[in-house]
Each structure stands twice: as structure tokens, then as C-alpha cells.
Amino acid sequence: MTSTAPAPTAAPAPARPSELDERLAAMLRAVDAPDVVVAVSVRGRRTVVSGGSAPEPTVPRTGQRYELGSLTKTFTCLLACEMAARGVIRLDDPVADYLPAGNRRAPGMSLRHLVTHTSGLPRIPRDLVLGALTRPHHNPYTGYGDARLLRTFAGARLRSAPGRRWHYSNFGIALLGRALAEAAGKPYDALLDERVLRPLGLTDTAADLGRADVPGDAVGRAGDGTTVVPSTGMGAFAPAGAVRATPGDLLTYAEAHLAPDATPLAEALRSACALQLEHGWPRRSGQTLGWIRHPAEQGPLLFHPGATFGQQAYAGFHPPTGTALVALATRRGRSCRVVQAAYELLYALAESGEPVARSR
């Protein structure tokens, strides 16, 4: 009696990389950074990739918390929208109603002017600029406290009358955070955690006020690629640049703006995306209550970049196609181009994606 062995089963052919996979791989190659993470969500389906020129750290790149820099501003502005939705503040209230010190040159300056960068305030206070010039290797924000911020505001000269022109201002968002804290009667970091981070389930996100690096935080590098750049303490400018987040949390944050009704902050999230003004030529930029808005073929995309002395960040989303993208990187010197590469990828995905069906 003979037996016949079964024919060997052929191994399945490896899956061909999708167009998204290929685009993400190309972006990783384009970014010169010790560590980089890119995360994309399309209609809720996530893809996360990471890489970099440095060895894989003990805590995986995808699990580390990164400094968001100016991307923090969107969190502070969302906090303002949330407090307005609950009636704690009104965005058109005068700034002087919430701060113990005002500016006699700007009696008509409102909270909305701060949120939309139309307050007329300079990007940063003059005394902070002078400190940076005299001590170029020192973080000028460290030690710049609330009392000094308010004194500087009281004597600040405006670039233009409130509401007349758009001019990006860290100074204005720092004052906004202080005003919100005064209105709520609690510190900015605790207020942000209570009203924005916890409701959105962002358990690995926080506004870190002067805290040193700990295991699990990404670490930036100087131009030599090895010298550690200390974490960026922001002092009174924390509302403009102190938030840290993991890639997963930041993607959850971006996704919340695509599906606000699935969150406890639906009204605030919708308000944050509402167009307030346009500026710039020939490509007109829009300003919402926190986000930069650019036109795309199927509808506008919203985004915000961020950078600190050792890291860069980007978050953006395109509601018509249900697409969100975040990118985080450590950098050595100024060679990292993760923000530009992330913007280009989001724009390409927005142009090629299928529109999300809307229920009637």
C-alpha cells in the first residue's frame, strides 16, 4: 500500500504596499531627524510609522511624549471655545475684564482678538527679544513669570489697532491662557487637563510647566546630533508652547475635530474649526479659532505646526475626506523638515481621498 504526500502549500505572496504605505515611507526618507513618528487616520483607520537616524530608544518612538511647541496654541484656543460654550466667558468680552492689568492703548482688545492673532500685539514682548539677543544660548522663556507678563502687557505698544490686521503672536496666546485661568480661578495646566485633555481621553498629554525630562519623553539633539537639548520651559508662555503628547494622543486629538459629536466637546470643537478671517496673497490663508486653514480641491484643510529648541510637531486634518495626520520629531539643529513634509503629505491625501458621505 502506497501513500501520496500532500503537495506543499505555496507561501502566500507578500502584500503589495498600499499607496499610503509608500507615501509614508517616502516621508520618512525625506525627514532628517534622530527620531520621527508619522501617524495617519483615514475614516478612523490608523497607520503609524516611525524611524530616524538615531538608534531605537528604550521607550519606543511611538510611545514617547514629544514637545508640541506652538501646536499648544490649538489646545489653549479649544479651551477658550469650551469655556465660551459653557458660558464661563464670552469671546467678545474685553481682555481687561479678566486680567488684573490692562493696556490703555488697547481698550477694545477682546479675547477673540487674542485667539485669532488680531490683537495687534507683537509676536513676543520686546524685553524677551532683548534677552534672547544678549544671551543667545539661553532659553528666554525660562523665568518669565505671570507678573512680568502682565507688566509687559500694560506697557506694550501695538503693531496695529485690535481687529485691524492678522499678526501671529505668542504674546497674545500667553495672555489668553492667563485670562482663562483668571476666569476659572485655577492654574492653566489644571484647567486644560480638566476641561480638554480628560474629556477627550488624552491621558498621555499634559501642559508641563518647567518640569525636567523624564523617561518616556523624547529628547532633542543639538547640531552635532549627540548633545542633548534640555526641555523647553515656557514660563508664562506655557499656553503658547508647553504641551507634550504621544503620537497616539495627538492623533486622537486631531480625529476629535473630524467627529466632534462623538466627544463631550462637540460645540467647542465645531467652534474651533469655524473660519474667522482670511489673510495673505496670492494663496489666501484662513484663521479659525486656533487653526490655520488652507484651501484644497475638495474643501479646506486645517493644521498647525510647532517647534521647540530640540523638537518639531505638526497636526492637521481634512474634514471632507475624514483624514487626519500628525508628525513628531526630535531634531539636530535646524535641519529637520518634518513640518513641511507633513503638510505636503496631508495636502496630497486631501487631494486624492474620497469624500466622506454625509447623512442628510
Image (cartoon, rainbow, N blue to C red):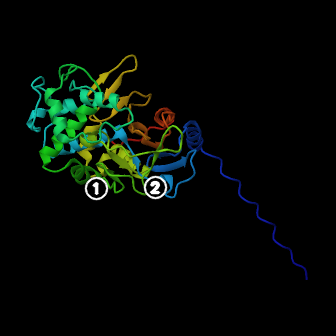
Instruction: Identify which residue is drawn at 38% across, 28% down.
Output: 294
Horizontal and vertical percent position of residue 108 = 11, 25
Let me know if residue 125 appears in the view: no
| Label 1 Cα neighbours within 10 Å, binned few <14 / some 14-19 / many ≥20 | some
Horizontal and vertical percent position of residue 10 = 76, 60
Q: Nearer the viewer, residue 201 or 144?
A: 144
First of labels 1, 2 by sequence position: 2
Q: Which residue is mark 2?
A: 63
Q: Is residue 275 above or below residue 146?
A: above
Residue type indicated by callout 1: Arg
Instruction: Identify which residue is drawn at 71% across, 57% down.
Output: 12
Horizontal and vertical percent position of residue 64 = 44, 53
On screen, residue 233 versus residue 353, left or right, reads left
Q: Is residue 122 above or below residue 282?
A: below
Q: Which residue is mark 1?
A: 198
Q: In what element is the residue under mark 2?
A: helix
Say which quadrant the N terminus sits in.
bottom right
Residue type indicated by callout 2: Gly
Q: In the picture, residue 306 is in which quadrant?
A: top left
Q: In the picture, residue 269 is in which quadrant?
A: top left
Say which quadrant the C terminus sits in.
top left
On screen, residue 226 versus residue 325, left or right, reads right
